[in-house]
Amino acid sequence: MKNLFNFILKNVHWLLFLILLSFSVWLIVKNNQFQRSKFLLVAQDITGKVYAVTSGFQSYMNLNTINAGLLKKIAELETEVYAYQQLLEMKADSVQTGSLEVDSLRVLIYQFIQARIVNKNISGVENYITLNRGAEDGIEADMGVLSANGVVGVVMATSAHHSVVIPVLNPKFHLSCKVKHSNYYGPLVWDGKDARYTYLTELPRHVDFEVGDTIVTSGYSTIFPEGLPVGVIVASQKQKDDNYNSVKIALFTDFYTLNGVMIVKNSYQQEQKKLQKEVIQ
């Protein structure tokens, strides 16, 4: 309080000047129509600019909420799309068998759960991503992870409220993919260099493809359904084994700006894995 009082005493002449100046402006504006109209125009202009800046800032602050809402809607739509595909496939089967089990339609093979990235490392070689969904949200290891544009990676481990994902940008990540509209497939492997590109390897040389062709998931796993977008072919080269080609893929997912994802839940994953394990043993 003493410091404030000393400050006022030291600058009392400036304070008095500002008070008198404000009072003079008020008298001029109040008693003169022309000056009052000009003052109102300037005040409205300044107020409008302040509101514009404030509105823009608020919109920017709300982007995360808007993006999360959009991603949640995409996840719901993806679930519906695969439900309808399942229904069409079962109806096609019923034409051949003459029956349709309505109760079986209640089980969705694939469901999509919206999640947010809380930590990511894409500057190294063995990269990882952490999500804000965990075991209490029904998330388990070996579940696929997607962005709104394409494949992101696979859940490696979970805690109660978080999960760690091994992304495409990790040499340990191998995913069976194929050229769209083709039955030939190969493993997707990252070379540890550029976060924008990966490689589809062990593709038979006689397979027809062109630069610009889309690469999608093959469906030969319990993790991802068939046909999910991965990237587009930008170049090709021969492997050491002359029987195979390796194609360079520009990824659809931009990992630098990625902040929201969808986790793929396969309702029959554990059943399929258990059966395959029993057969192999």
Image (spheres, grey):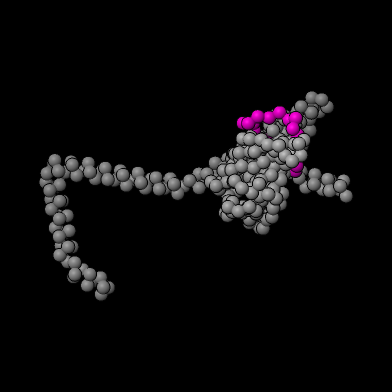
Residue at the outermost bottom position: 2
Q: Is 23 situated above or below 232? A: below
Specify start and end residues of the magenta stretch as a single range.
Answer: 204-222
**In this rendering, does residue 100 appear at all?**
yes
Residue 6 in percent (x, y) is at 22, 72
The stretch drawn in magenta includes residue 281:
no
Left/right placement of residue 47 relative to residue 110 reads: left
Left/right placement of residue 55 relative to residue 132 reads: left
Number of dots carrying numbers: 0
Magenta part mainly helix, strand or loop? loop
Residue 179 in percent (x, y) is at 69, 33
Residue 88 in percent (x, y) is at 72, 29
* Residue in the image at 82% along x and 25% along y: 96
> Which picture quadrant has residue 223?
top right
The stretch drawn in magenta includes residue 208:
yes
* Residue in the image at 58% along x and 50% along y: 116
* Residue in the image at 11% along x and 46% along y: 31
* Residue in the image at 17% along x and 63% along y: 14
Residue 148 in percent (x, y) is at 59, 40
| Image quarter (top left, top right, bottom left or bottom right) of the N terminus | bottom left
**In this rendering, does residue 108 appear at all?**
no
Q: Which of 118 and 81 is in front in this view?
A: 118
Q: Is 181 situated above or below 17? A: above
